[in-house]
Amino acid sequence: MTTLRGWAASGRGIGRRTAICALLALVLVAGAQGRSATTISITVTTDRGPTGGLDLATYGTIAHISGTLGTGDAGVALVLQASKFPFKDGFVPIGRARTQAGGTYTFSPKPTLATRYRVALALDTASTTRTTTVYVGNGDVSSFGCANGPVCNLHVRGVFIYPPPAAAHEGAKTAYFYVGVSYGSQSHAARVKLVGTGHQRRVGSNRFQVEFNFSFPTPGQYHYNWVTCTKDTEAVDGFGLPGHHHCGDRAIPYPAFTQWTG
């Protein structure tokens, strides 16, 4: 799945990306019968916000995983375990850390496809937290705009950056182009409407480019939003989010178009 978006007021535009931190409280249950449970908190912070409670990171960026050991003890050895799409090989250790003052810990993995994470005690790897999944979306470079005047001839050029294992499948998808215009103010559009579709053109080993044009009148103050996307197929290639997230619909309402679309 691919998403690019931008907005502009009276001819000036800016891209937008949201960073949201999702906090999960996990319980680590000791493996031996009769042993008291150890509570661990875990926070997943990515550069993109989750959709429907699902954590999403841009390809090439770090997913910050941190938390606190319930006992507050420092020096406790922990292991970060991961299972990467298609999840056939199970969990493997990918990082080690010791708790710091107050029992805090931090891991900084860089997922390339959907990846399941959990934290275990190094001396008792059968005792783990629940699993949390970080999904991966495209990186991108975009340019867009139109000159001030009675008509905006909007031109959008975007380059989508995919992880190599998913590039061929993602780059073959149809791209959808949406535009919404609000007149008389500089607030966001109430919705963006589907105004075009097109094919992606390979411009690198894992980079694909799209270009779209759309014209609309610009009497006085105006504000426009645009979005390009492709439909999610996370279950097939481990990229994007599971499910359907508006891409391909005739229109996408606010604020859904400011979030992940796929």
Image (tube, rainbow, N blue to C red):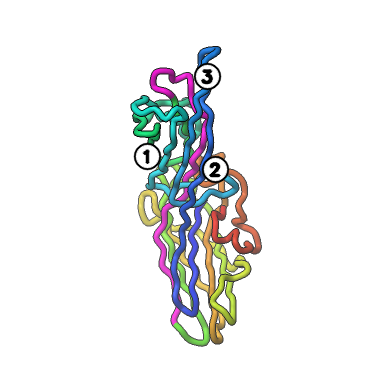
Q: Nearer the viewer, residue 207 or 84?
A: 84
Find the distance from the CA under tag 3 to the CA under tag 2.
38 Å
Can you tell which of label 1 and label 3 is closer to the viewer?
3
| Vertical placement of residue 164 versus 32, above or below | below
Residue drawn at (35%, 34%), measured in percent from left and top?
Answer: 101
Label 1 neighbour load within 10 Å: few <14, some 14-19, many 20+:
some
**Residue type, numbered disc 3:** Ser
Dominant SS type (magenta): strand
Q: Which mark is residue 108?
A: 1
Question: In the image, which residues are magenta?
Answer: 121-147
Residue 139, position in %: x, y? 42, 53
Cβ atoms under marks 1 and 2 closer than 8 Å: no
Q: Nearer the viewer, residue 200 or 241?
A: 241
Q: Which mark is residue 234?
A: 2
Find the distance from the CA under tag 1 to the CA under tag 2.
23 Å
Q: Nearer the viewer, residue 213 or 199?
A: 213
Tell me the SS state at disc 3: loop
Q: Nearer the viewer, residue 106 or 72?
A: 72
Residue 11, position in %: x, y? 46, 78
Q: Considering only order in the chain, which callout, 2 or 3, is on the residue closer to the N terminus?
A: 3
Cβ atoms under marks 1 and 3 closer than 8 Å: no
**Residue type, numbered disc 2:** Glu
Residue 125, position in %: x, y? 44, 20
Can you tell which of label 1 and label 2 is closer to the viewer?
1
Location of mark 3 (residue): 36
Q: Is residue 23 visible?
A: yes
Tell me the SS state at disc 1: loop
Label 3 neighbour load within 10 Å: few <14, some 14-19, many 20+:
few
